[in-house]
Amino acid sequence: MTDVPVTTRKDWATDQEVRWCPGCGDYSILTAVQLLMPELEVRREDTVFVSGIGCAARFPYYMNTYGLHAIHGRSPAVATGLAMARGDLHVWVVGGDGDMMSIGGNHLIHALRRNVNLNILLFNNQIYGLTKGQYSPTSERGKVTKSTPHGSVEQPFNAISLALGAEASFVARTHDMDRGHMQEMFRRAHDHPGAAFVEVFQNCNVFNDGAFAALTKRDARDSMLIDLKHGEPVRFGTDGELGVVIEDGRARVVTVAEVGVEALVVHDETDPDPSVAYSLSRLANTNDVPTPIGVFRAVDRSEYGSAVTAQIAASQAKAGPGDLHKLLHSRPTWQVA
Amino acid sequence: MTNIAQRAGEVRKADGIVLRFAGDSGDGMQLTGDRFTSASALFGNDLATLPEFPAEIRAPAGTLAGVSSFQVHISDHDITTPGDAPTVLVAMNPAALKSDLPLLQPGGTVIVNSDAFNERNLSKAGYESDPLEDGTLDGYTVVTAPMTDLTKRACQDLGVKPRDAERSKNFFALGLVSWLYSRPVEPTVDWIDGKFAGRDTVIAANKAAFAAGHAFGETAELGASRLMVAPAALDPGTYTNINGNTALSWGLIAASQLAGIPLFLGSYPITPASDILHELARHKNFGVRTLQAEDEIAAVGAALGAAYGGHIGVTTTSGPGMALKAETVGLAVSLELPLVVIDIQRGGPSTGLPTKTEAADLLMAMYGRHGEAPLPIVSAQSPSDCFFAAIEAVRIAVEHRTPVILMSDGYLANSSEPWRIPDVEQLGSINIEFASRPNHVNDDGEAVFWPFRRDERLVRPWAIPGTPELMHRIGGIEKEDGSGNISYEPDNHQAMVRLRAERIALIAHHIPPAEVVGDPDASVAVVSWGSTWGAITSARRRIESAGHRLAHIHLRHLNPLPANLGDLLRSFERVVVPEMNTGQLCRMLRAEFLVDARSVTKVSGQPFTAAELVEACWEEIGTTGAAR
């Protein structure tokens, strides 16, 4: 876009007091977004943040853009209407794991399936924070919370697997301890036409402190985070000594020295078939084993709002713009003198 | 007995006929009734229809549960109801006769497909003996025709398989009644050509069956049963026959044109509202966007999102969907954004009677949200009035920045009537103002935008994304009046609750006063809303033609009520409120105005008949001593 005024982080921040708990991972996500926005060359008035309910959903109040704080779970639905009506806007959807994977799960999967032009940021802290500490649909089995005093007996969602299963055209994962990586994922989401889903591992230091620490601690990252890079062999470890192979359709961690680098799977985020991306998402279902981050999938697919607008344009080209008089006389008529 | 009308070529005249087509769900009765209606409309009769069908797509063939009916009242004068009782019943099988004969007027005409009256079908319908022979039909004029057999014969040289030919028997019935009641033939023949274009054998079979039915009337010497209903002397103009859901859809498109902003419909399929989604999806050249959402909640959420973006956001549903949308409607109340929520009411609670009518969602529309969440309510009174009701609902929503509930019902949705097409230049206008500049100056002299700064009507600005300098955040959390900042202050919340109530109440100054139709000096006033208008109007005319007086006040706006309504009601000795619920408007009127209104209710899934309302009014008139 041309002639976009130069802005700084300050221009994108509001005067509202930020009300997350001190130490919350949401602060670092907010900072990453506010610092990124001036680089995206978009206007503040063309940017909208839509949220549901939960700690993460307070996000729009802190962004000096248009903002709509809706109701629990419904932000993807509200944002779908906005993005369909207004293809000129950049619409971001922000919510937590309870908001978007539990009460709003239905809206999330359909927004992804339709490929509505939304940037959906899932702040996954694996707990209900605003209601003070119940287990969530991403909490691990056995999780002891106020509502599961004997441990959760539920299988959690793997957010990446769910998004891939919901036909998402862009799926990525990042974490709140690495601003650079977050910004790269958010930038990619912004650039992607259609629905872009980004899971952010986010620490809730009050109700679920350290849930991702085994993965995201600075000295653990090299050996625990598998940073997916398009076109490169999937490889990690302090010296790149570990890698991932696909065998019988399943992803498996191997030692590079044992299998050779050519045996590693070369990551292709543009593969139309999501099977390998899905296999990669299944490498880790708990937070104590090596876990992939980065862009799992980024494929071109018709964006929903533009497809609807194209139908309108085609219909107008064929039938001419709507003529109310003609419409009212479009069924059999008769005259009374 | 000789009857002069029996002379060849002469047809008796009638001022009206109520014809009811009844058959199995698979017999095509809705289509047959619809064709008869269209031919009558083009002929110039006034008319009103009442389609009735089971909720099941195909209930077991031949059973009472599977009977599908279509009633149409054609008249040579202005009418407002589909008729209290049919004068003619077309029964395609024993189940149809069993289920609908009790509705027929004494002495009425029964036209039956005698081929369907075999042992198996009789037993499925619960007949122990053949009603065509056991005296069941004594006192009625009976016309029997072996419709199945004659249809097959008519089609035998057309290359149509007998089993397929049998499916054209509804056109035989249509041909027969078209002859009996002097309907023009051409509209139906033309329609067959268009509807089945590309399927030549189907066209040939349907036309052959139609012609055979028409010829049967002549050859079977049924002249004595022939009737002619002359065109009605309606107001001059161009007319079209329209049902409520189509009129409502067109009203939404018209409103979008009048407002000059696009229409967005979020909807989820539900009987009897789905046809509005179907109709609007066809008209993309008007810039209409339709979203068949994943559920009712998404449908209203998307509509609200579109409204936030500056479109006319609309969602359509029926009772169960209203329950699901309630939280989002509450959000719209809090956001003070325009939203039109359309409830095509049906029998409840729960799944209830999906294909039957009821008007029992009024108190849900009034109060069915948590917290104090008032909003305007508009209702439609006849099929064609759905057009104007839709425009009014949009007007209030966008001009007053509020969700509006528009109420129609299953009867209005599917019934049709002739509609004098309005001049589009005379539809008025809808005023849209998007905020374009800051509206407040901070203490430090900075010009800022306050999303909840109100005008003299207490209406806040509609500032849509994309507008420079007006970036703001709104949400369902209580906000400070003016700035819109989150506020949990006790005094602010109390003030906001009162402001939200007051701004809706103030809309009373922007709607027309309640009017009396009939005699304003009568001692009894009937107060009504929704589709009861037709039956009440018909009842009032009967009472007036019997030399008595009755006042009728019909309410378009149910919240806020017209400003003059209280004084008006108190000017009558008796107030009676007929409703297709257990007395919801009546409760509202008693609570609001302390008038001793009396409730007359019907919740059978059927609309009121005029006769039922004549009786109810008669009782009231009697109690006032005004009866002669």
Image (tube, coloured by chain):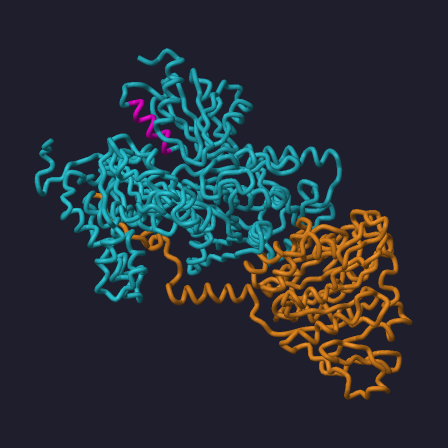
Chain colours: A orange, B cyan
The tally of labels here is 0
Question: Can you give x and y, in whole percent of width and height, for residue A97 in the image?
Answer: 74, 57
Residue A79 in the magenta stretch? The answer is: no
A227 to B223, vertically: above or below: below
Quadrant in the picture for the N terminus of chain B: top left
Secondary structure mostly seen in magenta is: helix
Pick the residue in front: A315 or B564: A315
Q: Residue at x 43, y 49 (%)?
A: B60
Quadrant in the picture for the C terminus of chain B: top left
Q: Quadrant of residue B140?
A: top left
Q: Residue at x 38, y 42 (%)?
A: B125
Residue B117 as seen in the image, left or right of residue B359: left
A37 to A152, vertically: above or below: below
Residues shaded magenta: B534-544
Q: Does residue B472 appear in this view?
A: no
Tell which residue pokes out farthest to the right in this image: A219
Question: Can you give x and y, in whole percent of width and height, for residue A224 in the image?
Answer: 85, 72
Pick the residue in front: B579 or B91: B91
B459 to A66, vertically: above or below: above
Q: Quadrant of residue B572?
A: top left
Question: Can you give x and y, in whole percent of width and height, for residue B234 in the image?
Answer: 25, 39
Residue B72 as seen in the image, left or right of residue A177: left
Question: Can you give x and y, in whole percent of width and height, for residue B33 in the image?
Answer: 31, 47
Residue B341 as seen in the image, left or right of residue B140: right
Pick the residue in front: B145 or A171: B145
Q: Does residue B566 appear in this view?
A: yes
